Structure formats: structure tokens, C-alpha cells
Amino acid sequence: MIPANKQHTCVFGLGWGDEGKGKVVDLLCPAFGAVVRFNGGANAGHTVCVAGKKFALHLLPAGVLHDAALGVIGPGVVVDPIALLSEIDELEARGVAVTGRLKISDRAHLVMPYHKLEDQLGERQVSDKARIGTTARGIGPCYADKMRRHAAFRFSDLADESGFDSRVRQVVGERKRLLDMVYDTEVDLDADKVLADMSTARARLKPCVCDTAALLHQLMDDGRTILFEGANGLLLDIDHGTYPFVTSSSTGPHGIGCGAGVSPLVVTRRIGVVKSYSTRVGSGPFMSELTDETGDRIREAGHEYGTTTGRPRRCGWFDAVACRYGVRLSAATDIALMHLDTLSGFDRVGICIGYRLNGETVDTLPADAACQSQLEPVMEYHSGWSEDLTAIRSFDELPATAVRYLERLESLIGAPITLVGVGPDRSQTLLRGDLTDLIDVPEPTNA
Ligand code: IMP
């Protein structure tokens, strides 16, 4: 058994994003040499609360909030350099020095302005039912170009200034003609403006760009451990999520190989993060959704509004079938169950333990979105608890009904709950097992 402080670790979402990964990563950061993003882009939204200050991170790994850890953006991330610069500026204005400890892969692809336009226009074109509800950050179109190859740009391309500029002029011209024609509009896309922005990005980000896979292998050779930070969530995974209502990347530990250039086989600790209820933002099947006042009550109690878009999140009871699906896919070793405090005051708490489809009970997720949207949840209910959990600091202090709820979840999903969140602050975290060797939960701050 490898000791906790020697294990390369991945934190990833088991739901449709917004599970509270940022807080878990943030707690783990001090124990690691580098924190690595390996998938997605500025569609992700991590809210981290440090010393009473709230930080919303989209592209930057949470490691940048820690002096000791290096923040790494791996080759599998699609980076909007302008969004990245404004995120850096915002943090630096609040006293967090970022540039010195940020590394960006020279293989990471650039999200260009036409990718964002394509995201917005593409969504406008389709019916409400078919709309994916993207965050409009250009993620899907950028990954599509990456796969198509000839009109894609990576950070390494920025080095050859004149070659980059002439290729950008050509691609911007082609895209403008294409978008104008397909969407019968006049898109605001000007090659000079794009090149001016890219030139700023080149100058400011140059010191950060390097071969990050080589850097990570060097750190590992030197005995440092690496923390991989998954964005989005397994139910949004391009292959295994509720397709087509998903994002365009591999969101779990399986994405580390391609997205970071490190074998997932070396990542022996896999912490799946999930809320004690379910949420989803954007369209798509949501098997345990509550469209009644219980759902509204969860939304208000849990402040369930999007970090990236501000959209109200759809809310529902915990879906043990979907969670078990993610646990199996990722071989999760630990579960971090967040927002347990949000469920205080409910007379009863529900768990979805199966789905009913055409009169039959199923316990896996069918592939087809139309089938998924017809799934009816098979529910079981447990007594709730009235106690406020936000000041609790250990598992032993939890009310008996909350303990029974956790035990039932563990038996349904097949992995141990070793971390429980009882509030947004770092201090509001309960730990058990050898995670206690890895995480120092701070004292509460009143700042
Ligand atoms: P895209 O990744 O912007 O293309 O969005 C695709 C779908 O994934 C949409 O339903 C988004 O709302 C959802 N999504 C993408 N990233 C996140 C996230 O970090 N949290 C929650 N939903 C997300």
C-alpha cells in the first residue's frame, strides 16, 4: 500500500459538473508539487473560499492559490488566451501572484474568437430540445478543429510569428465567410483584432509556455507528487456522459493520459467528488430531477447558480445509479461528498436507486438520449435531520440520520466516503482514513 503522501492523485467530478471539486483540490494542494488541469477549458468554474475571500477560477488550476504548488495547464486543455489573461489579472489585482508559478503546455490548443462565435450561433440555430446549452466558451468548436487539424492552433505555433500570423489571417477569412453564409449574418470577426490579441497573449504568456509533460515527469523523478484536477464531470464526459448533452473532453482519470501526457496507471488515488444531491446546468436528461418546490428549496439552500454563466441549476435527489456508473468507470478509491449541510431541515431525503424504462427496472445508463430522458427514478426515502451541520468538524459529531444516509450511499455506490463538505469554507470539511495524513483542515476564519 503506497502511503497517502506518495500517491499521485486525481480529483474529478462524478456528476454534471459543479460538485465542489475546487474546494477538494484546494485542500489537497499543499501536499503536492504541481496541480494539473488536463481537460476542458474556460467552461469549468471552480469557486474556492480562502480566508473569507471567494475566488472563481475557470482556466487556472486551483494550485495557483498556493505558494508552494505549480499550476499546470496540460496539452488536453483548450485555452482561450484572452480569458486566461483576464483571470490572471483579476487574481493578481487581489494579491495572488500567478504568472511565476503557472506553466502552459506548448501542445495545448488555442480557443479562437471564431470558436466562441460558432458555439453561440450553432446553439441559436437548433430547437430548444436539441440545444446542448453550452457555456459558449468555444470549447466544442475548438476540440473539433483540433481533431480536424488543418485549421487548429497550439501554443507552440505562437513562436513562429510570421507563419502564425499568415495562417490566422487565412483561417479567420475562411471562417468569417463560412459563418456569414451558414448563419445568414455578418459576424464581427476581424483578423487584425484577432492578431493583436494573440500578440498580447504571446508576449505575456511566453514565460509560462513549455513542455509540461516533460516537466511533470521530471518532478515525479524528483520524488514530488502530482495532483490532477478534472474539470466538468463524468456525466458530461464526451464518451461516457449523457451524449450529446455533454462537453467535448474526457473528464475523468482516463483523460489524464491524453490530457496531461502522464499515464493514468501511476495515479493510484482517485477521489470522485459528488454533492449529497444532484444538480445539472444546461439541457439534457436528469433522472432524479425535482421540478417542484423541493427542488427550488435545494437550489436556494445550496446557492445553486452557475459560477461560469450565473444560470440557475436544475436540482434533484442523489442519483446512486449514475454515481455508481462513474465510480466503476473511474475506479474511484475515495468519495468526497459535498454540501451535506444543504440537506439539513428536510423531513426526508431521497436517493434514486434505479430507473424504470417501459415498465422494467434498469440499473445502468442507456446510451440513447431519448431513452435517458424517459427514465423514471425508482426512489427510496430516509429520515432527514434538522441539525445545522456547518460547525461540525468530525464524522463522530454527525446526527445519526445523516450517518445512516452516508452508509446507505456508500453501499449503493461501492466506494468509501472519506471526505464530507459541510460548508463552503476550507475549515468546513470532515475527513477520515488516511486523507487525514494528506489534508490539514484549517481553523475557521472570521474574515
Ligand atoms: P460546453 O462544455 O461549454 O460545450 O457545454 C456543454 C454542456 O456541459 C453544457 O450543458 C454545459 O452547461 C455543461 N458544462 C460544461 N462545463 C461545465 C461545468 O464545469 N459545470 C457544469 N456544467 C458544465
Image (spheres, grey):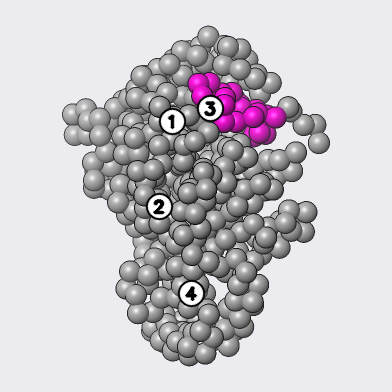
Lower position in the chain sequence, tag 2 or tag 1: 1
Q: CA distance from mark 2 to mark 1?
A: 18 Å
| Quadrant, the N terminus | top left
Q: CA distance from mark 3 to mark 1?
A: 13 Å
Q: Which residue corresponds to the image point at 24% horizontal and 47% vertical from the top-left? A: 368
Residue at which label 3 appears: 435
Label drawn at residue 156: 4
Q: Is residue 244 placed above or below 4 in the rendered structure?
A: below
Image quarter of residue 445: top right
Q: Can residue 355 be seen? A: yes
Numbered label attached to residue 262:
2
- SS state under label 3: helix
Q: Are marks 2 and 3 in contact (CB under 8 Å)?
A: no
Q: Which residues are magenta?
A: 420-442
State the residue position of label 1: 2
Cα distance in 3D space between marks 2 and 3: 23 Å
**Residue 308 % position (x, y):** 57, 53
Q: Residues within 10 Å of mark 3 (few under 14, many from 20)?
A: some
Q: Amino acid at mark 4?
A: Ser
Instruction: Kindly tell me whether residue 186 is visible in this rendering.
Output: no
Q: On the rendered structure, is 258 left or right of 391?
A: left
Membership of 432 in magenta stretch: yes
- Of badges 4 and 1, nearer the viewer stands 1
